[in-house]
Image (cartoon, rainbow, N blue to C red):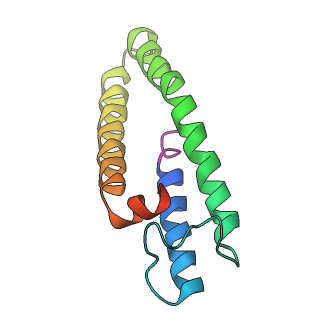
Amino acid sequence: MTLYPLIPLALVWATWFAARLHLGRIPKAMADDPKQLGGAVPVVYVAAYLSLGGLLMGAPVYAASLLIYGVWGRENDRLIRVALLVIIAVVETVLVVILLQSRIGEWFFD
């Protein structure tokens, strides 16, 4: 569950990479729509799109489970696990922001 937020990001980059292989050049935003390209690009695009939707819908559940575990978890390792989960969440958030500000994010979400 902790690594799940990395899967949608990896699928977005995989979509971009598949489009690059299909086109033979770097895909351009507003010109090369991933839904319209052939080959494996639409399949990877749909997988990325669905996993991003799951990530957005699962975020409140993820936060609630972190809070519940932090309050009612086992005493001996609760602080360490909560700290690790917070660090992982921050790293994943930074990766999402980098993706959204990159050319890949602009091309994927255009």
Which residue sits at x=50%, y=70%? 16
Drawn side of residue 102 relative to residue 19, left or right: left
Which residue sits at x=53%, y=52%? 8
Residue 2, horizontal then vertical, whole percent = 48, 40
- What is the quadrant of residue 28 in the picture? bottom left
Residue 50, horizontal then vertical, whole percent = 64, 47
Drawn side of residue 7 relative to residue 63, left or right: right
Q: Looking at this view, is 19 or 4 the one in front?
A: 19
The residue sitting at the top extreme is: 72
- Part of the protein shown in magenta: 1-5
Q: Looking at this view, is 69 or 25 the one in front?
A: 25
- What is the quadrant of residue 57 in the picture? top right
Q: Is residue 5 above or below residue 48?
A: above
Q: In this view, does 80 lie above or below 3?
A: above
Counting labels gives 0
Magenta-span inclusion, residue 63: no
- What is the quadrant of residue 98 in the picture? bottom left
The prevailing secondary structure element of the residues shown in magenta is loop
Residue 71, horizontal then vertical, whole percent = 39, 9
The residue sitting at the front extreme is: 31
Residue 3, horizontal then vertical, whole percent = 49, 46
Which residue sits at x=51%, y=60%? 12
- The N terminus sits in image quarter: top right
Which residue sits at x=57%, y=76%? 18
Q: Looking at this view, is 83 or 76 the one in front?
A: 83
Magenta-span inclusion, residue 2: yes
